[in-house]
Image (tube, rainbow, N blue to C red):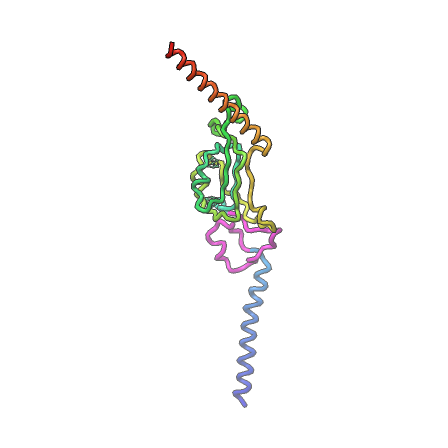
Amino acid sequence: MSEYFSNIKAGAVTIATGMSITLKHFFNAIHRKGDAGIDDADYFRQVDGLCTLQYPREAVPVPVNARYRLYNDIEDCIGCGQCERACPVTCIAIETIKVVPEDLAVCGKTSGGQQKKFWVPVFDIDVAKCMTCGICVSVCPTECLVHSPVSDFSEFDRQNMIYHFGNLSRLEAEAKKRKVAEQQAQAAKEKQAAAAKAAENSGQ
Ligand code: SF4
Ligand code: SF4
């Protein structure tokens, strides 16, 4: 009989101990964690305080060296294609058009003063394939391709995961291509005429 009551007593003590631990954490969680920012090594070691955020109204601060969604400042892109070639999963697609001499001033220079020699009508990044390895960023000579702090960019449509940074519309690109083709045809004609004249002169 005494064993029966001692078991009940042990059960009650166990429940009370467990509940006291639970209540301690419950009341401690009412408060925010300390002032340590996310960059502080001790931030996740703090045992007391709220550990969940009211997402998306609140979000964990992004570390300054975070590698999230890519962004290309196309005004500084020289269309060299190094990022496209370096990407191990081919998620960057670029198309370029040579800038004809009279358009060089319009095409302009990068913020570092480098003359841009290519229009970049297509600069697409398929971020659904991107593994944020950062190789493309590290090879970019003008540092226009960067990881942005945007970490939440979920979409319902897979196509919306392809980001377009090109600096020409389709019609503008067609006009530029026509101009290049015309100049090439003119140059070929002049070369042909010069060769014919040289042949004529040598025959005299
Ligand atoms: S971060 Fe890596 S995977 Fe993503 S586009 Fe750049 S090279 Fe490709
Ligand atoms: S490496 Fe940089 S400059 Fe070259 S095409 Fe890519 S983003 Fe543009």
Question: Relative to the observer, which residue lies in front, 190 or 167?
Answer: 190
Viewer-closest of 34 and 139: 139
Question: Can residue 203 be seen?
Answer: yes
- Decide: is 183 above or below 124: above
Q: Quadrant of the image for the N terminus?
A: bottom right
List x then y, in percent, for residue 39. Answer: 49, 49
- The reply to whether the magenta stretch includes residue 55 is yes
- Image vertical order of residue 90 relative to residue 43, above or below: above
The magenta-colored residue range is 33-62
Residue farthest toward the bottom in the current orientation of the protein = 1
Name the residue: 41% across, 12% down. 200
Above or below, comparing residue 25 to residue 155 in the picture:
below
Q: Nearer the viewer, residue 11 or 177?
A: 177
x, y percent for residue 51: 55, 58
Q: Is residue 135 left or right of residue 72?
A: left
The quadrant of the picture occupied by the C terminus is top left
Magenta stretch: residue 34 in it? yes
Judged by its main secondary structure, the magenta piece is: loop
Tell me where residue 184 appears, x and y as whole percent. Answer: 49, 24
Count of marks, rendered view: 0
Q: Quadrant of residue 199?
A: top left
Residue at horizontal 44%, vertical 37%? 82
* Residue 110 seen in the figure: no
Identified at 46% across, 47% down, the residue is 89
Please tell me which residue is depicted at 51% across the width and 36% down the height of the picture.
95
